[in-house]
C-alpha cells in the first residue's frame, strides 16, 4: 500500500483517476492506517464482512481466521465497468504500481479528448 501512496497517488490527482481501498478492518484501524500512510484516497470499511460474503470472495482455508477476504483489485473505467481484475495473495495476484499505471493509461487513451493533434490517433478512429 505504501508504494501506491508514494508513487501512484501524486499521478492520480492530475490524471483524473481515483483509488479506493475497501478493508475488513474496524473503521478506527482503517483511519489510522490511512493517516499513517498519508493516503488522500478513501478507505471504506466492511468490518462486519457482509460485502465479502455477498461477493463470494471469502477464503475459508484457514478455519481459525475465517472469514478472510481474498485480496482483489478491480480497475474500473469511467462508466464503472470492470476493465481488469487482479486477485490473489501472492506477488502475481497483486498489481504493481507500474501495472496500475499502464491500466490507467490504457483507459485514459480511450477518451476522445486525450489526443492533442488535429486528427484522431489511428487506433481511435471509428470504422
Image: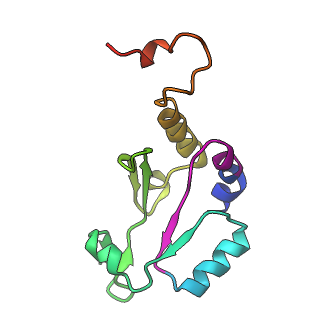
Give me the residue at 51% from left, 29% from top: 109
What span is colored magenta in the figure? 10-24
Q: Against 40, is 85 above or below?
A: above
Q: Against 102, is 21 above or below?
A: below
In terms of depth relative to the viewer, which is nearer, 111 or 74?
111
Position in image of residue 110 (x %, y %): 46, 30
Say which quadrant the N terminus sits in.
bottom right
Position in image of residue 93 (x %, y %): 43, 54
Tell me which corner region of the image, top left, top right, bottom left or bottom right, holds residue 71: bottom left
Give me the residue at 59% from left, 42% from top: 98
For residue 23, side relative to residue 53 (left or right): right
**Was residue 15 drawn as part of the magenta stretch in this picture?**
yes
Position in image of residue 66 (x %, y %): 34, 84
For residue 71, side relative to residue 52 (left or right): right
In terms of depth relative to the viewer, which is nearer, 123 or 90?
123
Q: Against 103, is 88 above or below?
A: below
For residue 120, side relative to residue 36 (left or right): left
For residue 49, side relative to residue 42 (left or right): left
Q: Against 31, is 105 above or below?
A: above
Q: How many labels does the image show?
A: 0
Q: Residue furthest bottom?
A: 64
Position in image of residue 26 (x %, y %): 52, 86
**Color scheme of the displayed model:** rainbow
Say which quadrant the C terminus sits in.
top left
Give me the residue at 36% from left, 48% from top: 82
**Was residue 34 drawn as part of the magenta stretch in this picture?**
no
Amino acid at each position: 500500500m505504501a508504494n501506491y501512496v508514494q508513487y501512484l497517488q501524486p499521478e492520480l490527482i492530475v490524471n483524473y483517476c481515483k483509488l479506493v481501498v475497501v478493508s475488513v478492518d474496524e473503521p478506527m484501524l482503517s483511519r489510522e492506517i490511512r493517516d499513517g500512510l498519508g493516503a488522500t484516497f478513501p478507505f471504506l470499511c466492511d468490518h462486519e464482512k457482509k460485502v465479502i460474503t455477498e461477493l463470494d470472495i471469502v477464503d475459508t482455508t484457514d478455519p481459525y481466521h475465517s472469514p478472510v477476504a481474498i485480496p482483489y483489485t478491480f480497475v474500473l473505467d469511467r462508466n464503472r465497468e470492470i476493465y481488469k481484475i487482479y486477485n490473489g495473495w501472492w506477488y502475481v495476484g497483486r498489481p504493481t504500481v507500474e501495472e496500475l499505471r499502464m491500466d490507467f493509461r490504457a483507459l485514459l487513451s480511450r477518451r476522445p479528448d486525450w489526443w492533442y493533434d488535429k486528427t484522431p490517433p489511428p487506433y481511435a478512429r471509428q470504422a
